[in-house]
Amino acid sequence: MKVVDIVGVPLDLGAGRRGVDMGPSGFRIADVGPRIRGLGYEVCDCGNIPVPIPEVIGVRDSHARYAREIGEVCESLCVRVRESLASGHIPLSLGGDHSLAAGSIAGTAAALREQGRSFGLLWIDAHADMNTPETSRSGNVHGMPLAAVLGKGPIELACVGGFSPKVDPKRCAVVGLRNLDEQEKQTVRQSGVRAYTMKDIDLRGMAAVMGEALSILCADGAVLHVSFDMDAVDPFISPGVGTPVQGGLSYRESHLLMEMVFDTERMIALDVVEVNPILDTQNSTARLGVELILSALGKKIL
Ligand SMILES: [Mn+2]
C-alpha cells in the first residue's frame, strides 16, 4: 500500500500577514489524514516541524526578512522529505507560507540525486515567487522560493541541502499567474521557466495548458514535485490566503489540474501552502485544499 507522510510546517516568517502558521491545523481540522486514508493510502502524520515565531527573533535583513530562520526550517523539512522519498513514501508538506517549498523541493532534489533520477517542478500560483532580496519591495521571503530553488534568491534558501540549483528552469512550469510587477515580468521572461498565465488558461483551457506543461515536465521519464499555493485559486472559493488576487482558477479548473497530475502517475511529492485560517471563512480554504490533495492522489468522480 502506498504511504503518504504528512508534514506540517507552521511557518509564517516569510509572509507579510500573520496567521498562515495555523494552516497545518486548518488541514488537520478538515480531516486531511482520514480523507487520504479513505482513498486507500496508509497515512503517517509526522506532526509539525518546529518553527520559531517572529516575537522571539529580530529582523536582521529587511531585504529578506527572517531568511536565516526560514533557511533553518527548510533544512529540517529537506531532511524529512528526503527520508520520506527514500522510504518510497509520498511526502505531503502542509503550510505555512510558500517559503517552505525551498525546503521540500531541496528534499526532492536530494533524494532523486541519490537515485540518479530527474524531476519536473509544477508551481501553481497567482504570483511567480521569483523575487530576490535585491528586487523584492516587501522583503517577504515567501515571494522568493522559486528563485531560490533555481539558484537565486536569498542564499540561506538557495543553499538548503548543501547544493544549488535544485532544478533546471526548463524543468519548471508555473500555472495560474496573474500578479507580477514590471521587474518580475522581466525576470520570468528571462528565466527559462514555462509560465502559463490566467490568459493562457482562458484562451486555451486548463486541459490544453496542463497537457502541454505535463508533457514538458515529465519528458524522459522525469517524476513530478507539485507545489500548490492556494492563492492560485480564485479568492471567491479560496478566501483564506494572505495575498488574494481576483481572477483565479475556478473550482473545476483547480480540480482538473490535480486530476491530470494524478493521471501522469508521476507525482512523488506535494506541497499545499498559504492557507491562513485567520483570514478564512469557516475553514473553507483548508477544506478546498484537502479536496484538491485528494484529486492529486487519485480521487475520481466516476
Ligand atoms: Mn506562492
Image (cartoon, rainbow, N blue to C red):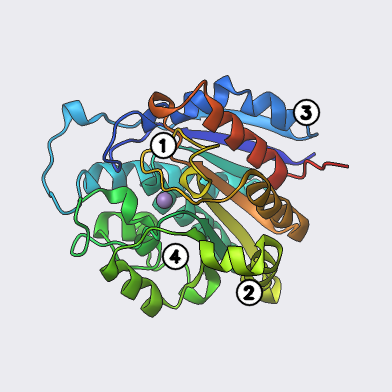
Residue 39 position in % (x across, y down): 78, 34
Q: Which badge, 4 or 1, is on the more N-terminal residue?
A: 1
Residue bearing mark 1: 96
Q: Give me the C-alpha separation between circle 1 and circle 2.
A: 29 Å
Mark 3, residues whose alpha carbon is within 10 Å: few (<14), some, or many (≥20)?
Answer: few
* 42 left or right of 92 in image: right
Residue 38 marker: 3
Which one is earlier in the sequence, the residue at label 4 or at label 3?
3
Q: CA distance from mark 4 to mark 2?
A: 17 Å
Look at label 2 and name its amino acid.
Ile
For badge 4, the amino acid type reads Lys
Residue behind mark 4: 166
State the mark number for residue 216.
2
- Quarter-wise, where is residue 300 in the image? top right
Q: Are marks 4 and 1 in contact (CB under 8 Å)?
A: no
Q: Which mark is first along the chain, 1 or 3?
A: 3
| Disc 3 element | loop
The picture quadrant where one finds residue 161 is bottom left
